[in-house]
Image (cartoon, rainbow, N blue to C red):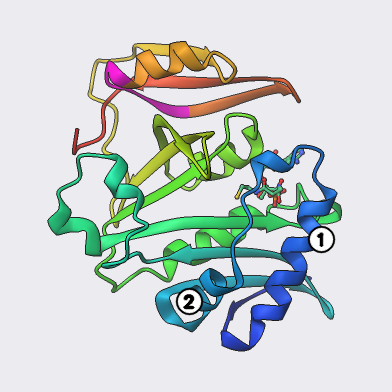
Amino acid sequence: MFDVRRLGPGDLGLILELQERITSSLADKDVFQTSTPEFISYCLAGGGRCYGVAHGPDTVAYRMVYFPRDRAYNLAKDTSLPASAYGQVGHWDTIAVMPRWRGHGLARTLNARALADLAGTDIRHLFSTSSPENPHGVRTLIETGFRPVRLVRKFGGKLRFLLYRPRPAGWPPHPPGDRTERIVALSATGELDDAFHDGWTGVGITIDGPRSAYLRMARQPPPFR
Ligand SMILES: CC(C)(COP(=O)(O)OP(=O)(O)OC[C@H]1O[C@@H](n2cnc3c(N)ncnc32)[C@H](O)[C@@H]1OP(=O)(O)O)[C@@H](O)C(=O)NCCC(=O)NCCS
């Protein structure tokens, strides 16, 4: 029913059109950061990797991955990851599913494919950002093995979780015997900020409703703090 395919330089128009349709469908446009044609072209041409999900003749979802290499825009710069490792960074950039096809696991499928395709590459550190106002966006990343590790301001001052996943192995298991957990509302940004600074990271999310979601946190800081 759904086919995932790697997109190439000829698919710029397709992504731009999907981006436009998805943006215009969003109630809160602040949660979705659009990309410039230059950035998308760069990713399509091998500076990253882009995937689309086809349903019959239509493309209904896409995911972009970006490798900053020696370019200026690198989320690792918001962390203490050593500069010598910047070349091994991958960004889980934009993902979007057409409204009608949400809840069919397409984000999960795209994330799994993009992660599997990194096999054999030198990419060791994956970063992403997601708005605390977009719990479903955060959840699909946590399901892919990312953890919110701090709050940052991006895209002209918008509040975002910075999420991190090491690869190929994901986060190490929770230290044996430590079952301490903390539950913090996504809206409690001051409390989240303090928790991140104290070495807590997000391990799960509970979504009760559109304005009610909670991050489950474990005391396990990222390896590069
Ligand atoms: C966030 C987004 C990419 C998730 O895509 P998706 O394909 O619907 O997600 P999945 O179906 O793989 O999600 C996994 C789970 O979350 C649920 N879910 C995801 N988005 C949902 C939504 N908007 N409403 C209700 N449930 C949702 C799914 O039902 C699924 O639940 P399950 O585990 O019980 O099966 C999609 O909602 C979207 O395109 N949003 C607008 C753009 C955006 O915010 N992108 C992220 C920032 S770049």
Left or right? Give the position of 132 relative to 171.
right
Work out which quarter of the rendered image holds the C terminus and state it: top left
Magenta highlight on residue 198: yes
x then y, percent, for residue 219: 30, 19
* Residue under the point 29% across and 74% down: 120
Badge 2 crowding class, 10 Å Cα cut-off, few under 14, some 14 to 19, many 20 or more, is some
x then y, percent, for residue 8: 57, 84
Name the amino acid, label 1.
Arg
Give the mark nearest the N terminus, 1 or 2: 1
* Callouts 1 and 2 close, C-beta under 8 Å: no
Note whether residue 159 is visible: yes
* Residue under the point 59% across and 71% down: 51
Left or right? Give the position of 48 relative to 71.
right
Residue position marked by numbered label 2 in the rendering = 42
181 w.r.t. 110: above or below: above
30 w.r.t. 72: above or below: above
Note whether residue 2 is visible: no
Query: Most extreme residue toward the front, as rendered?
Result: 156
**Residue 108 or residue 133, whichever sits in front:** 133
* Residue under the point 57% across and 20% down: 186
Left or right? Give the position of 162 relative to 224.
right
The quarter of the displayed image where residue 187 is located:
top right
Quadrant for ligand 1 reads top right
Give the total number of marks visible in the rendering.
2
x then y, percent, for residue 178: 27, 15
Q: From mark 1 to mark 2, how far is it between C-alphas?
A: 21 Å
Say which element carries label 2: helix
Name the amino acid, label 2.
Tyr
x then y, percent, for residue 206: 61, 23
The residue segment tinted magenta is: 197-203
Residue position marked by numbered label 1 in the rendering = 21
